Amino acid sequence: MAGGVAAVGLAGLGYAHLETKLFTVRRITVPVLPAGEPDLRVLHVSDLHLTPSQGRKIAWVRSLAALEPHLVVNTGDNLAHHDALGPLLHALTPLLTTAPGAFVMGSNDYYAPVPKNPARYLRRDTRVVHTRPAELPSDELAGAMVAAGWRDLTNRRDTVEADGRLLSLVGVDDPHLDRDEFPPSSPGPDTDAVLHLGVTHAPYRRVLDRMHADGADVVLAGHTHGGQLRLPGYGALVTNCDIDRRRASGLHGWPGPRPDETGGNGSTWLHVSAGAGTSPYAPVRFACRPEATLLTFTAR
């Protein structure tokens, strides 16, 4: 009996490691644009946690340019190794050179991952205070993306033109490290913008509330890994922040659920990416494949 249980456990662990390599593209339609606007394709990439040896992941990220997005939004945690900047930029180059973009940083753009007690993962919020952190080349990463024309939304506002249309943007630095400082309102509204987009790495409630109050039509976030370990019929075990488990990944409403495409209750659309990577010290996923998401914004 014990041997059978052990065999099942090992098989499950083996599959959970295999699943980290089963990259997929989710496709979601969001009815958020003004009436009469043509569709807008937005590629949401998050939580790559790249190490230099992950050739399969690098090739997959490079292939995403074939989706021909009008805009790319990167919600952070790109790096998982101090030598990963070159491989990461190689992976992102097809997107950096073909599409406008915007980004924020996550904790693993600033600091290298460290081994942790796996039991800590089951806590609701596993933020770590880095007393002597090993720093990652976040400035160089941000500089490369800005040089390609992507908008840095680290506690700031900006605008971007996508498919010939103006979008207004607001973003914050990583709330998981308490680095978020919501930027002050602009002197006047972007009256020509067809969409107001909020961007954050970690979907903490305080940030989502501010973005909702700011009038964001859609908020994009990552960080949760979709729970990383999900149980059929139960879903994510944790979210690694203070958002509820039901909204650990996918499309939802904030502060409450959206009704349907024809209704409206004043909620902001919220998309939380399950991300495409893991910490190198916990290379497992279960019922939660690594992903990027192609969001098609359509007219309401």
Image (tube, helix red, strand yellow):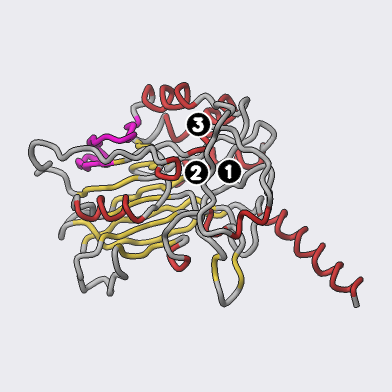
Q: Looking at the image, tell me whether mark 2 or mark 3 is earlier in sequence order.
A: 2
Number of numbered discs present?
3
Amino acid type at mark 3: Tyr
Q: Which residue is mark 2?
A: 64
- Of badges 2 and 3, the one in the foreground is 3
Dot 2 surroundings within 10 Å: few (below 14), some, or many (20 or more)? many
Q: Which residue is mark 3?
A: 110
Q: Are marks 1 and 3 in contact (CB under 8 Å)?
A: no
Q: Percent position (x, y) of residue 78?
A: 52, 37
Amino acid type at image mark 2: Leu
Left/right of residue 220 with respect to residue 235 in the rendered view: left
Within 10 Å of disc 3 (Cα), the crowding (few <14, some 14-19, many 20+) is many
Q: Which residue is mark 1?
A: 60
| Disc nearest the viewer among 1 and 3 | 3
User: What is the distance, in whole Å, between disc 1 and disc 2 at their CAs?
Assistant: 7 Å
Is 171 or 84 nearer to us in this picture? 171
